[in-house]
Image (cartoon, helix red, strand yellow):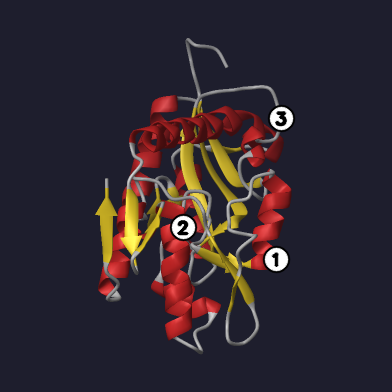
């Protein structure tokens, strides 16, 4: 694309692994980009399970028009926002977005064009978030006392959920996911089935759950707890644990 008359692309993408933690409905990323890179079909697939697929994208001859429409759409679907530019919207809303893009002069582009145009933009966002999390990890090494034992962040969450399962004898995975309704970037859930967690490990090469320390529910189902806890998300869990009556002391 030439710099003198740069066009813009408004796109909608999804990943089968990024879903609402309770309803399990797909979430969609509604974004905008002017960048173009070599086709590698989303390098971010190395960082999380599943692959990113394009729902649709519209090209506007003037990038400013695409950016304005993106802002307008984000305002309209704001109540369905889950994380950043990710939204839990239905087919009716998606069709409405397509009609609006056509009405304002957008031209539907092919899937291969979408893949080329948005790869670098999404990849850069994820890299920035990972760098921020690494920086945060280095700055915070707090530990926590729970039931007279000392834990780091991830082990604390595991201990609390084990304790909760032992108290609530007939609790199900679905109920646990409803109670501990915290969704990580990339669609990871706090508690997951062992089989799903194994697939995540196989697809990414990273064990994001305590696969070596599963929890068995009363119905015999094996579940595992997520390990992705840092200073930027542990506070949400601590608040939930407090609501449930658990006493946790922060030890600096």
Q: Is 4 located above or below residue 48 in the figure?
A: above
Residue at left offset 34%, top offset 33%: 139
| Residue highlighted by disc 2 | 155
Q: Separation of disc 2 and disc 3 at Cα?
A: 37 Å
Q: Is 152 located above or below residue 40 in the figure?
A: below
Q: Separation of disc 1 and disc 2 at Cα?
A: 21 Å
Out of 207 and 19, give the one closest to the viewer: 207
- Between disc 2 and disc 3, whose residue precedes? 3
Which label is found at residue 40? 3
- Could you tell me residue 167's position as x and y percent? 42, 84
Looking at the figure, which quarter contains the C terminus?
top left
Q: Is 54 located above or below residue 126 in the figure?
A: below
| Residue highlighted by disc 1 | 195
Out of 151 and 36, give the one closest to the viewer: 151
Is residue 146 among the parts visible in the rendering? Answer: yes
Disc 3 crowd rating (10 Å Cα; few below 14, some 14-19, many 20+) is: few
Cβ atoms under marks 2 and 3 closer than 8 Å: no
- Could you tell me residue 69's position as x and y percent? 39, 40
- Could you tell me residue 86's position as x and y percent? 45, 50
Q: Is 118 located above or below residue 160 in the figure?
A: above
- Between disc 1 and disc 2, whose residue precedes? 2
């Amino acid at each position: 694309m030439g710099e003198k008359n740069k066009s813009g692309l408004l796109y909608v993408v999804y990943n089968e692994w990024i879903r609402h933690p309770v309803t399990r409905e797909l979430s969609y990323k509604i974004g905008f980009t002017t960048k173009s890179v070599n086709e590698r079909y989303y390098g971010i697939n190395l960082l999380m399970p599943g692959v990113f697929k394009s729902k649709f994208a519209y090209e506007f001859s003037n990038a400013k028009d695409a950016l304005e429409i993106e802002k307008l759409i984000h305002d309209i679907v704001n109540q369905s926002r889950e994380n950043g530019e990710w939204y839990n919207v239905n087919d009716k809303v998606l069709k409405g977005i397509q009609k609006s893009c056509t009405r304002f002069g957008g031209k539907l582009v092919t899937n291969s064009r979408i893949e080329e145009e948005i790869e670098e933009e999404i990849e850069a966002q994820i890299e920035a978030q990972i760098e921020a999390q690494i920086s945060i990890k280095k700055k915070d090494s707090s530990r926590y006392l729970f039931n007279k034992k000392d834990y780091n962040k991830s082990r604390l969450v595991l201990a609390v959920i084990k304790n909760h399962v032992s108290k609530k004898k007939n609790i199900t995975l679905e109920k646990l996911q409803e109670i501990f309704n915290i969704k990580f970037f990339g669609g990871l859930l706090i508690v997951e089935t062992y089989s799903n967690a194994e697939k995540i490990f196989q697809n990414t090469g990273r064990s994001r759950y305590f696969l070596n320390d599963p929890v068995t529910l009363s119905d015999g189902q094996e579940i595992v707890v997520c390990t992705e806890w840092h200073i930027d998300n542990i506070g949400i869990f601590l608040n939930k644990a407090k609501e449930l009556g658990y006493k946790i002391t922060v030890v600096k």
